[in-house]
Image (cartoon, grey):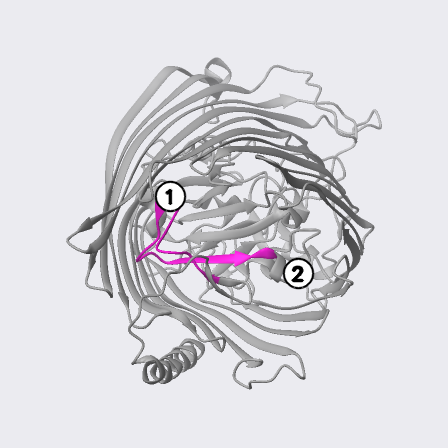
Amino acid sequence: MKLLSFIFSFSICFSFYNAQTVDSSKILSEVTIIGYKTMNGIGRMKDHDGQIIYAGKKNEILLIDSLDANKAINNTRQIIGRIPGLNIIESESGGFTANGIGFRGLNPYQSIESNTRQNGYNISADIFGYNESYYLPPMEAVKSISFVRGSGALAFGPQIGGMINYELKDGASKPIEVTASQTMGSYNMFNSFTSIGGTYKKIKYYSFFQYRYFDGWRKNSQQHQMSGFASIKYTPNEKFQIGVEYSALRNTIRMPGGLTDSLFNVDAKQSLRSRNWLQSPWNILAANMKYKLNDNASVSLKSSFLYSQRDLVWRNEDGGPGALDTITAYLEYVPREVESERFRSITNELRFLTNYYVGKQKQTFSIGARYAYAFKKNQHGAEGTTGVDLDLTTTSPWGGNMNFYTTNMAVFAENTFRIGSRFSITPGLRQEYLSTIADGYDENEEGDSDDAYVYSKMKKKSRTFLVGGVGLQFRTSETTNIYANYSQSYRPISYSDLTPFGTIAQIDPKLKDASADNVDIGFRGHVKNILNFDCSVFYINYKNRIGTIYRTDTVTYAFRTNTGNSEHKGVEAYIELNILDGLIQTSRFGRLSIYNSYAYINARYVKGDYVGKFVEYAPQNIERVGLNYKKRNFSVNIQYSYTSAAFGDADNTKFSADALSGIIPSYNLIDVSSSYKIKQKYQIKMGVNNLANAKYFTLRTAEYPGPGIIPSIGRMIYVGISATF
């Protein structure tokens, strides 16, 4: 039964493909694709776009405006849940600014195994030193989201989980266009979004401002958020374009803390923490340049500067999730702990692509270089105030005060060799240089009063590594192809891996860098306006994976170490069928389509202390089935989501009294979203997330934002109105 959905989807794909082959066998003329290959908002990238080659790589693209979803709170499973195998850590309501995602049994915590980008540049603090995602653009401002799985390591950097890019809107073709949207929802949620953009002569501009307030589904989980963006592009002629843009985020988040299993079962909305706060102001300034040398060659340069921080004041994890916030004999709370991190980074990426001919056959060559420098200051363990509000005042020295420096340089090259009109092979190489430096002091958990700190005086580690890959693509018809890809990837030890977050977590001093081999084989495409599909199998050989286990001495504590080697094998299938105005050639009753996004993932340890155990946070089955209906100005989407159970640690603990480890149970969710347009200028949006009010969670943690279980949001109703002028 595990493979039933995949087999059903695959059989339908090949059935329609066979029909298409018969119908199109006499079509010999070449078709030039000038846009993305999409149907109902989801499809594949072109063989190359800009200066990047996508031929033979597992990739998807989502056009956001075509989706009915709750964009006011960035509902991840509705917006990008159609991508097969997407595992979501729904921690946004528990103390993070964005939900984390992972594919194929890889770690979804804060998307740390993915390369997260906006408009083609990185938006995490440091992809090698601190790759956690604290800023994501509001979905109302996003034009499209593109995904490249493990094969993205060559063009974008060697993250094992691949690349995700949020492409923002860039302004209308008329001189000015204004969009305003107001959304209200359960738990006193209010979201306001306003954008302005347009084109005047050779200048194109776009900007937005978003404000969101949310009381939260749980007690003590209020959120304030403001985000903004501004861009301007100047195109003096058809060959040259230059632009600059700025992104900003300001927020305050109250963190309700974690729960034990028994507390969660009694009342998942309760909170034992009222004094935990986070703020993560984010600033990104970026400049870009594109130049078309001729009809076959172009070059681009993207430069970005990130100036951000992350501040936390909390009653830490000591005592576990059931520990009450202590009041002293002086009738005041005990002092909280203060953490502070500062990020400064600059990144430059230069890319060149050219088409050239061998005989009459066109070939494509891409080459690029990257230079990045990042600085992180990590200060933690200071005693804070006894208050309740967000107050970062410290009343003691820092327990740890570390400076981290990262220098990264890389060059890569790929070439698409086309053999005949149907087959292509794309080999590539990427050479990386990475240098990390640590300077400062940190608390010594195993020391005594005479040896309370560990000092690191400009401790430096440098390494170079070469990753390679090759992609194959065979065009079976004008709109379908078979693809296969092998690529190597790499994940060095990050600063977050080396820094215990809290007072009792510990780090293995022998921690090693991780690496992986990725393989994809699949069949994808679309048949007329009837069928859209991508069915594939994958394999990952993950070496020296970094994870967290739990040890017990006088207390239970988290221990971060290399948990061993793992193998991830499975299938991914997306199939969408247009029934009305597709299979049935009539639009009289509107347009009706159904889709099934399914993944089977078998991720187990094959080397180390946990051989045969399941990889943590790797559910075996993830399925989302949806229905889209549209008639004239009305549209609705109904989506059912199922995620099977997973383990929270490498030892596959089924239950622990402190809830730090244990099973993450399976869950089923239903989301409904609809919209109605009035005169193409106005739009009314409404919907319900978690219609059946399922009680579930996706995260157990020994540290921030817990400790313990972090419950996910129950039923939420929203309604909004937008206008465009």
Identify the mark nearer the N-term, 2 or 1.
Answer: 2
Residue placed under numbered mark 2 in the picture: 69
Give the extent of the magenta segment.
43-64
Placement of the N terminus among the 4 image quadrants: bottom left
Horizontal and vertical percent for residue 650?
41, 52
Drawn side of residue 706 relative to residue 196, left or right: left
Task: Tell me how many marks there are.
Answer: 2
The amino acid beneath tag 2 is Ala
Q: Nearer the viewer, mark 2 or mark 1?
A: 2
Residue placed under numbered mark 1 in the picture: 159
The residue positioned 44% from the left and 40% from the top of the image is 559
Does residue 45 belong to the magenta stretch? yes
The amino acid beneath tag 1 is Gln
Q: Secondary structure at mark 2?
A: loop
Drawn side of residue 67 relative to residue 184, left or right: left
- Relative to 60, say whether 674 is above or below: below
Residue 590 falls in which quadrant of the image? bottom right
Residue 722 falls in which quadrant of the image? bottom right
Residue 498 falls in which quadrant of the image? top left
Does residue 465 belong to the magenta stretch? no
Q: Secondary structure at mark 1?
A: loop
Horizontal and vertical percent for residue 373?
41, 23
Q: Residues within 10 Å of mark 1 (few under 14, many from 20)?
A: many
